[in-house]
Image (tube, rainbow, N blue to C red):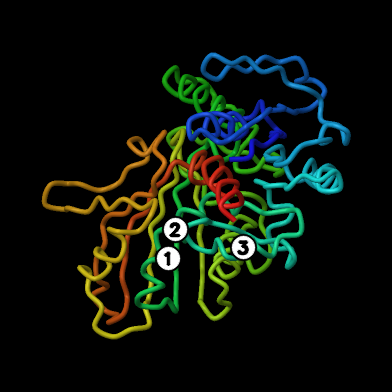
């Protein structure tokens, strides 16, 4: 196998670190690895296994001789440097929202739409974390029974808002126990006018509000789902909520299939053999997915599958996954693996 020169932009962040760990863990054929970040992070040492890497400042020349560049440093950084990397011969796998809805950029979940990789023009987009786990779980159902409607409510971990949000949750928890005034500066969105405590709370806002009263996170889920499935006819609606959970996004998902006579057992059978999906569904033994136990696990976990009592083709389910892994780093590495296969 041909060895590849790799660059990771945003290498000091939670996702960047996980990308490096997954590349090493999965024995990706790497000839060299270049860790890139902002100027203030240059010189930072990152150790994975027995290897220590030194972080460099991201500049256009950083991408000379790079074959695959993973980007996870924010949309503005991707906008600034992704095309610079492509111009120097690299294929970019971007973890931000910068190119997701660009019609020329494939938006890829390898278990769902790997065929779109052949259309890339140098940049491949990694979908939103909450979208990835949902479409991965629903793909085997869609293939066998069709999908005409999805209504999803998410319960998202603070790690999706970055390391500062994790720190804020931990500090607020201490402040609450000491009965101090709880200070908030990060959530629901760092750029918002108001900030609310996340400790012992639930915030029904992720990102800023956009059109029709939906947040940008909700619009991402709705638009990205249709693009990944390649089907604009699917009715998709989302409500996204932040919970005081460190890692692992949870989702309550209602679907309506197209075929008649589908049963819960049919859905179980469809998902049981799906790549990257693990069924945990036995109410009699209280066996169902939870984010605490999904942390550091690669799969998407599905449980609480049940028939809607009022809609013949309607079903409910509970989907959980580690948002930093399948929702970001792992999916990116799997995209790179698919590129090598092709």
**Dot 2 crowding, Cα within 10 Å, few <14, some 14–19, many 20+:** many
Disc ID at residue 311: none
Disc 1 versus disc 2: distance between alpha carbons? 5 Å
Under tag 1, what secondary structure? Answer: helix
Residue at numbered disc 2: 136
Under tag 2, what secondary structure? Answer: helix
| Nearer to the camera, 174 or 22 | 22
Quadrant containing the N terminus is top right
Q: Position of residue 117 (x, y in %)?
A: 63, 60
Q: Position of residue 177 (x, y in %)?
A: 41, 20
Image marks 1 and 3: residues in contact by CB distance under 8 Å: no
Residue at numbered disc 1: 139
Q: Report the residue at 68% width, 47% height from top.
A: 94
Residue at numbered disc 3: 219
| Nearer to the camera, 39 or 32 | 32
Q: Report the residue at 68% width, 54% height from top.
A: 124
Under tag 3, what secondary structure? Answer: helix
């Amino acid at each position: 196998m041909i060895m590849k020169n790799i660059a990771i932009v945003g290498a000091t962040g939670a996702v960047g670190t996980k990308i490096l760990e997954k590349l090493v863990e999965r024995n990706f054929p790497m000839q060299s690895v270049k860790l890139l970040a902002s100027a203030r992070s240059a010189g930072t040492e990152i150790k994975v296994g027995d290897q220590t890497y030194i972080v460099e400042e991201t500049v256009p020349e950083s991408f000379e001789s790079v074959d695959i560049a993973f980007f996870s440093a924010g949309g503005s950084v991707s906008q600034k440097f992704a095309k610079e990397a492509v111009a120097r011969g690299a294929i970019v796998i971007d973890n931000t929202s910068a190119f997701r809805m660009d019609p020329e950029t494939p938006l890829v979940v390898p278990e769902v739409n790997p065929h779109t990789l052949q259309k890339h023009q140098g940049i491949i987009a990694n979908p939103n974390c909450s979208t990835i786990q949902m479409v991965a779980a629903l793909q085997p159902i869609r293939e066998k029974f069709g999908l005409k409607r999805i209504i999803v409510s998410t319960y998202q971990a603070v790690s999706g808002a970055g390391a500062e949000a994790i720190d804020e949750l931990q500090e607020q928890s201490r402040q609450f126990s000491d009965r101090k005034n709880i200070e908030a500066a990060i959530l629901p969105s760092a750029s918002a006018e108001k900030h609310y405590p996340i400790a012992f709370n639930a915030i029904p806002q992720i990102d800023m509000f956009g059109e029709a009263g939906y947040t940008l996170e909700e619009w991402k889920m709705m638009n990205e789902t249709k693009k990944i499935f390649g089907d604009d006819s699917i009715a998709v609606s989302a409500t996204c909520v932040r919970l005081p959970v460190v890692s692992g996004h949870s989702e309550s998902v209602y679907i309506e299939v197209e075929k008649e006579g589908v049963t819960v057992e049919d859905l179980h059978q469809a998902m049981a053999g799906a790549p990257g999906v693990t069924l945990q569904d036995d109410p009699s033994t209280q066996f169902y997915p939870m984010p605490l136990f999904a942390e550091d696990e690669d799969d998407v976990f599905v449980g609480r599958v049940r028939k809607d009592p009022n809609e013949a083709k309607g079903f409910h389910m509970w989907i959980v996954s580690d948002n930093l892994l399948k929702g970001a780093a792992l999916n990116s590495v799997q995209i790179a693996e698919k590129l090598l296969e092709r």
